[in-house]
């Protein structure tokens, strides 16, 4: 364990390097300056409060990452067997592992990587909106780089890396890098990549759907996507772990349908028991006052989904069906949380902005 002074010095140095890089061509963006300042204060405060136990703060995924950096990789090298490649999260772990050799704390480097991915999400989201003639306003930022993502940047997780690569594989400018984004998503969370591929295929099928048939076909296709996802999870478990292939139980139970609805209002914790959700219900409700984007984004996206915006069908249909299929995949598990949905939140938020601005523009045209 390094001293607080050394940890704080490393934190400030990394943050300074990011600010220098971000401001090399122009003055530093106000939002980037804010999130970097928050990150420095939050990361140092967490270390001050918890010390070496910082890896137990919020998520035990950080414990797994610490073990990878300090035990598995030093002792076992970098295995290229499929099991390790898919479970050791190489895209985020290996850069931190190699850079830590020069003296930086490995967990701090993982936190720094999440900050970098937050900045990349912000810049990519802004560029996407500008390319589509939308003037970026501060309230837009809440929809794709809001308080939840800012908080997550202070933790040694993989969620913002996932969100960025998922996002870039959909709206990135460079086709080759989009493929790399998709493959990286697959390495970090394979079933998310499968869900994205399904969403893309579904959006292709929806190209020929007429406006008057949109809602009924969307309804039937939603049920089909959910069922297919649930069966695919069982099929995947059979291939990977040799689990006997069985039909998903209680596929249309009240609990599972309620949980799907809860995902669209950010309240899925109400459908999980205390073995999964450690915090109290009151605490989680109050947390939504701070992390309001968890509720705002999926509800706004669902509203925009039903608007008549043919120009945006490809992206919104891709995200919607990827999300439904993803929920089907995890419906027989306890992997259902806002963290799991974070890659979807970024894209749902951008689609919501597009829908809101398109609606606003059409109203202005009618008035004119």
Image (tube, grey):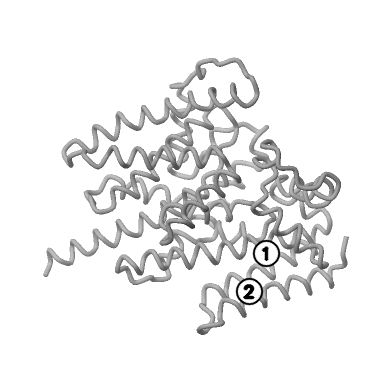
Query: Quick one: label 2 or label 1, which is nearer the N terminus?
Result: 2
Which of the labelled discs sits on residue 230, or is there none? Answer: none
Please tell me how crowded label 2 is: few (under 14), some (14-19), or many (20+) other residues with Cα within 10 Å: some
**Quadrant of the rendered image containing residue 18:** bottom right
Residue 167, image x and y in percent?
Answer: 47, 54
Q: In whole angstroms, how far apart are the C-alphas of marks 2 and 1?
A: 9 Å
- In this rendering, position of residue 254 left or right of residue 134: right
Q: Residue at x 19, y 35 (%)?
A: 213
Q: Nearer the viewer, residue 11 or 199?
A: 199
Q: Nearer the viewer, residue 142 or 267?
A: 142
Secondary structure beneath disc 1?
helix
Which of the labelled discs sits on residue 18, or is there none? Answer: 2
Q: From what the image shows, is residue 224 above or below residue 24? A: above
- In this rendering, position of residue 73 left or right of residue 126: right
Q: Residue at x 33, y 44 (%)?
A: 317
Residue 292, image x and y in percent?
Answer: 49, 55
Counting every numbered tag in the picture gives 2
- In this rendering, position of residue 355 left or right of residue 47: left
Q: Nearer the viewer, residue 72 or 151?
A: 72
**Quadrant of the rendered image containing residue 87:** top right
Q: Residue at x 18, y 66 (%)?
A: 364
Secondary structure beneath disc 2?
helix
- In this rendering, position of residue 3 left or right of residue 9: right
The quarter of the picture where the N terminus appears is bottom right
The quarter of the picture where the C terminus appears is bottom left
Please tell me how crowded label 1 is: few (under 14), some (14-19), or many (20+) other residues with Cα within 10 Å: many
Q: Residue at x 49, y 26 (%)?
A: 232
Residue 8, image x and y in percent?
Answer: 78, 71
Mark 2 and mark 1 in contact? Answer it, CB < 8 Å.
Answer: yes
Residue 312, image x and y in percent?
Answer: 28, 52
Q: Which residue is mark 1?
A: 112
């Amino acid at each position: 364990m390094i001293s607080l002074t050394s940890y704080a010095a490393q934190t400030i140095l990394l943050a300074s390097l990011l600010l220098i890089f971000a401001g090399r061509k122009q003055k530093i963006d106000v939002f980037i300056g804010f999130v970097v300042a928050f990150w420095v204060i939050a990361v140092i405060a967490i270390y001050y409060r918890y010390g070496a136990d910082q890896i137990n703060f919020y998520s035990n995924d950080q414990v797994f990452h610490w073990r990878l950096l300090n035990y598995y990789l030093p002792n076992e090298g970098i295995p290229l067997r499929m099991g390790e490649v898919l479970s050791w999260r190489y895209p985020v772990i290996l850069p931190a592992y190699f850079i830590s050799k020069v003296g930086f704390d490995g967990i701090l480097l993982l936190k720094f990587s999440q900050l970098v991915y937050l900045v990349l999400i912000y810049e990519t989201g802004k560029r996407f909106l500008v390319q589509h003639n939308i003037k970026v306003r501060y309230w837009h930022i809440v929809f794709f780089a809001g308080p939840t993502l800012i908080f997550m940047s202070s933790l040694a997780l993989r969620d913002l890396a996932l969100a960025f690569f998922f996002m870039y594989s959909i709206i990135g400018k460079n086709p080759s890098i989009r493929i790399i984004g998709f493959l990286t998503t697959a390495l970090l969370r394979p079933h998310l990549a499968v869900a994205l591929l399904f969403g893309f295929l579904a959006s292709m099928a929806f190209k020929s759907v007429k406006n008057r048939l949109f809602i009924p076909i969307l309804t039937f296709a939603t049920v089909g996507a959910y069922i297919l996802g649930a069966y695919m999870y069982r099929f995947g478990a059979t291939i990977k772990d040799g689990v006997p292939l069985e039909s998903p139980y209680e596929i249309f139970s009240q609990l599972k349908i309620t949980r799907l609805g809860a995902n669209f209002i950010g309240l899925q914790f109400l459908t999980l028991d205390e073995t999964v959700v450690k915090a109290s219900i009151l605490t989680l409700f109050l947390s939504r006052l701070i992390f309001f984007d968890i509720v705002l984004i999926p509800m706004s996206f669902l509203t925009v989904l039903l608007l008549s915006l043919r120009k945006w069908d490809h992206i919104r249909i891709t995200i919607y069906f990827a999300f439904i299929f993803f929920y089907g995949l995890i419906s027989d598990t306890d992997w259902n949380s806002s963290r799991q949905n974070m890659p979807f939140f970024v894209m749902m938020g951008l689609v919501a902005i597009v829908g809101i601005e398109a609606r606003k523009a059409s109203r202005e045209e009618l008035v004119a």
